[in-house]
Image (tube, rainbow, N blue to C red):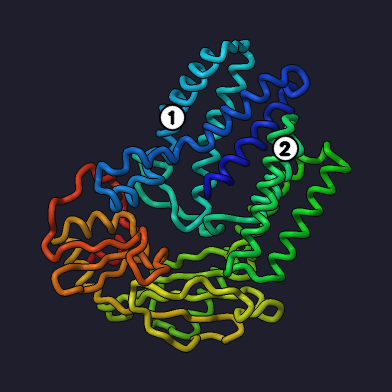
Amino acid sequence: MDNLTHSLVGVVSAEAVLRASGQQKVDRRFCHWAWLVSFAANNFADLDYFYAFISGKKLGYLLHHRGHTHTLLGILPQALLVGLGSWCLMKLAGVKFQRSQWNILWGLIFLGLGLHVGLDSLNSYGVHPFWPWDNRWFYADSFFIIEPVLWIGLIVSAAFLTDIKGLKVAFLLMGFVAVGIVWYAPVVHPVIALGVTAFFLGAMLLCYWLPHLALSLGIGTMLMMLGINISLSRVMRQQLYTSWKSHFESVWEIHDLVIHPYPANPLCWNYVLVARDESQRNIRLERGNWAIWPKGWPVSSCEWFNRSSTAPLSAQAPWHHPNQLFVEGVMTLSRAQLKALNATHCEFEAFLRYARVPFFLDRDSSWVIGDLRYDREAALGFAEMQVGKTPGQCPKWLPPWIKPTEALLKD
């Protein structure tokens, strides 16, 4: 998830813990510090940006972001660092707290670090929380990287939970900006944008009239979105698998299906799939959109992402009912060539430790390699690289992540 969501979750979860412990009525200064500590803990894992370069600038980011800092084992050293940093900051500010209060802060630190890993597992980027015992990637495929409804619920909740006027105003301004982004974003249908706006205004009125419900609003929004998106991701996956099997039978077998809902609209889903043919010689990559309720919200009402891409996707008619499916494009790769590059090209081999939907293009003296999950522009994006036909210096300090395409690379 994005860092705004992590931050807001940190604030709301801190207030929930403070109320459960009774501290919010005893010492507001401690509550302010608890918010700050929880904010730090909920964002600390993303400091992996600062060491990702050890394996190369772009490749290092792909391999190390959401890497060791996003593991259960990695929580302990990070907790010690956050705790030490908090203690030093309090020392400089001349603030002292009782042991019982420090127990609450330590709980918030561990909770925040755990929530960060859990939230980041919800989208298609994935995490590997059980390193070093299990180095596979785990993906819930249930959320887009940002979720405006979650933003709104948490922002309004935080605005009415704080007793600092300047912070309250900042949160409310943030809410108006979030609504503006929803209206501006080309992937959000105007009807959905109107619904998000109504939710924002309704949430503010609710908390203004009944301020004691502010915490319930934040927690309720999180639980509601988790329930809706996780449930509908299973529905969408089952629908597509069933339709695919009935159409292609044994011609193409799906190896992996990457899905995510559109922002604020879990009726529309983007999918990218990897399939292999019955001869086991070819790999099919396909990207498109799926409407899980085509009678009420057909796929034509799903606003499109940018359709340009580095990968040369070929247009194809939908293989299912056009009210439910839009195929953005298809690309076919040689499985033998994928295996050969993995075996002989160290940069490509390293890239495959990250890429869930890898593609490669022959550009005379170089290869262009990328991951179709995040290929949304004709130029090279953050998940595309240009490497020499002959590997240069092989990347170092590679993490031991199991390749998402491991089964395709075996004989």
The x, y position of residue 317, in whole percent, is 47, 89
Mark 2 vs mark 1, CA separation in Å: 30 Å
The x, y position of residue 176, in whole percent, is 69, 52
- For the C terminus, give its image quadrant: bottom left
Q: Residue at x 47, y 55 (%)?
A: 139
Q: Residue at x 28, y 46 (%)?
A: 400
Front of the two marks 2 and 1: 2
* Labelled disc at residue 310: none
Task: In the displayed orientation, state which residue is furthest to the left.
Answer: 390
Characterize the local packing of mark 2: few (<14), some (14-19) or many (20 or more) Cα atoms within 10 angstroms: some
Q: Which residue is mark 1?
A: 78
The x, y position of residue 137, in whole percent, is 40, 52
Which residue type carries mark 2?
Answer: Lys
Q: Which residue is mark 2?
A: 168
Please state if 341 lies on the left or on the right of 358 as rendered: left
Q: Residue 158's image quarter?
A: top right
Is residue 295 shown above or below 368?
A: below
Q: Residue at x 22, y 57 (%)?
A: 349
